[in-house]
Every structure is written in C-alpha cells, then in structure tokens.
Amino acid sequence: MAKRARVLLVAGSGSDGKAIGRALTDSGCLVRVVPPGPDFFTRVNQWGPDLIILGRVKSHPGRAALLRILRNGARTRTVPILTLLESRPSPKAWAQLEPTDEVVRRPVASQELAMRVRALLRVKKLTHTTRRTLKRIQEQARLDSLTGLATHGAFKDRITRELHRAHRYRRPLSVLMADVDHFKLYNDSFGHPAGDRLLRLVGRMVTRQIRKVDFGARYGGDEFSIILPETTKHAAEAVAERLRATIENYAFPHRQAQPLGKVTVSIGVATFPEDVPTEKKLLEAADRALYRAKADGRNLVRGLESLR
C-alpha cells in the first residue's frame, strides 16, 4: 500500500480551510490544518509534512515572514510550498512570494488544486531520488572499487581536516603507510587478477583492524594508508604490528612463491606532534619510515625514531 502524502494546510479554522482539506483528502492526501499561531513551527516540525499549502494568514508574523522562516528551517527548507492568493499581487508582493514553489489564485476548483498538489509532490519525489542518487555517486567516487577503502583523493581531504583538528586541540594524530612487499613480483608471476584478489584481501584486513573513527585508504597501487585520530605513537605502532602480523599469517594463494615464503607488508608510522613539530611533515615522515622498513628487510614496522 502506497504511503499517503502528508499535506499541511496553513489556514484558519473557518469553512474555507475545511473545504480545501476535504478536496485534498478525497485526492488521497493525509491533510492537517494548522493555524499560524504561536506553536505553528513546533507542530510543523513534529508532523514532518511532504507539502505545505499557505492559505490566508492575517495574524502575526504574516505570510512573507512565514515563508522566509519555513525556507530557513532545517526540516522545512526542502518541503515544497504552494501559496493561495486572494487577489493579483503587486510587484512588491511578488518579491515577498519568492520563497514559494507555486502560486494559485483563488477561486480555484478542487480538482485543479489537487492536480497542482500532485505535481509538486512528484517533483519533490524526483528531487529526493536525484539527491539520493547523486549522494551515492559521490560516495562511490570516494571509494576504491577494488578494495572498498577510501580513494587517495578522499584520504587527502580527510587528513587535512584531521591535521587541522589535531593542531587546534593539541591532540595526537598518527598515520600508517603500508606497502605490500614484492607485489610486482607477485603480480608479474600470477597475473593481474591474482594481484587484484590479493589487494582486495589486504583491504579487508585493513578494515577489520581499525576502529570506526579511523580512516583507511588505498593510497595508490599496492600502498595503503591509515589515519588514526587521538592515537599516540605507542598505540599506533601496536595497530601497525597487529596488521603486519595478521597479513603475515594469512594463507594467501601462491604465498610460498614469494621471496619471504609468505605475503607480507612493511609499515611506516609517524605521529603528530610527538614525532614532527609541524603537521605538514606528518605524511612525509610516515613515508620515510615506510622506506626504512623496506630497506631494513621488509615485513617490519618502523617509526620515526628509526630515522634518527
């Protein structure tokens, strides 16, 4: 059974409001008549209408003010508004009616009013669907299709925000940079589909090892990055070691053919402000620590103290 549209009619308690309410009810809408009194906005927000019809408003704050407030309200700014007019408005009155979506001049047949209401509800439904689709597309564009982690671009946006917050509130912020050891050899030996499967599995392990407040991303190729807010150097190294051991002990396909006899990762760790005095140096420090882990033999976790 289709959900009935909620239409809120702003009008007095006279016969005019009742007649409009009956016409809309007959067309399948769920109608509530609310006078523009002191508790008007509370009642509007509580009911959550799909459409608002603004009838005669003779009391304070007036029609123009009601329109402005409805358009600025968090719960009503996207709700379509149809305004009923008793006479042809002056140029000044037209300017005041700008926030409305539709204007209908009385007298209007109940069938015409019902048709206008249905049209506005269809537009609202289409707009809502379009926004939802756009949001889904935007979210997908920020996710790596192979691993399900965030993309490099999403990582850059997030690290900028987290660095600003860490600097402002003087809180620790750690970053891990991880790289799959000898991935090119694995990819060349067993083909790109096998390499993709390996990266997909590593991505899942990254997701399972971090908290909801953390942020995992595929930084590029076989390199992964993790943002750890509110995390000290010691705690970040523990996370990195846990991830390294999980991957080392996992039974990846063809792992025996790798130089170490298994699939492994090297991880660099850096923490602000403990390791670096300025937030701009954090990614650079994590990257340097990663390459030191590679140079020291791979399958290792290295922090910035290894560089001193």
Image: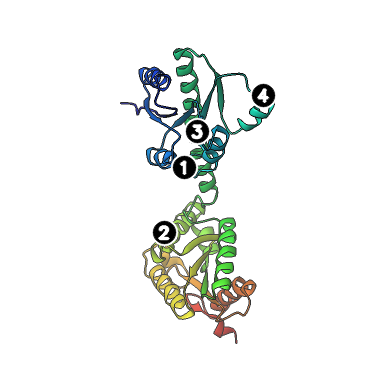
Report the amino acid beneath label 1.
Arg
Residue 289: where, in percent of width, then height? Answer: 57, 77
Answer whether labels 2 and 4 touch (C-beta < 8 Å). Answer: no
Report the amino acid beneath label 3.
Ser
Question: Gap between marks 2 and 1, in whole Å?
Answer: 38 Å
Observer-nearest of 149 and 173 = 173
Identify residue for label 1: 75
Question: Gap between marks 3 and 1, in whole Å?
Answer: 23 Å
User: Label 3: how many residues lie within 10 Å, few (<14), some (14-19) or many (20+)?
Assistant: few
Report the amino acid beneath label 4.
Ser
Answer whether labels 4 and 1 touch (C-beta < 8 Å). Answer: no
Identify residue for label 2: 204
Q: Relative to 96, is 237 on the left or the right?
A: left
Residue 9: where, in percent of width, then height? Answer: 43, 28
Name the secondary structure under disc 4: loop
Q: Nearer the viewer, mark 3 or mark 2?
A: 3
Name the secondary structure under disc 3: loop
Identify residue for label 3: 59
Quarter of the image with the C terminus is bottom right
Quarter of the image with the N terminus is top left
Question: Gap between marks 4 and 3, in whole Å?
Answer: 20 Å
Residue 139 is at least partly visible in this image: yes
Residue 81: where, in percent of width, then height? Answer: 51, 30
Identify residue for label 4: 90
Question: Gap between marks 2 and 4, in whole Å?
Answer: 64 Å
Q: Looking at the image, which residue is at 47% across and 22% down? A: 117
Report the amino acid beneath label 2.
Arg
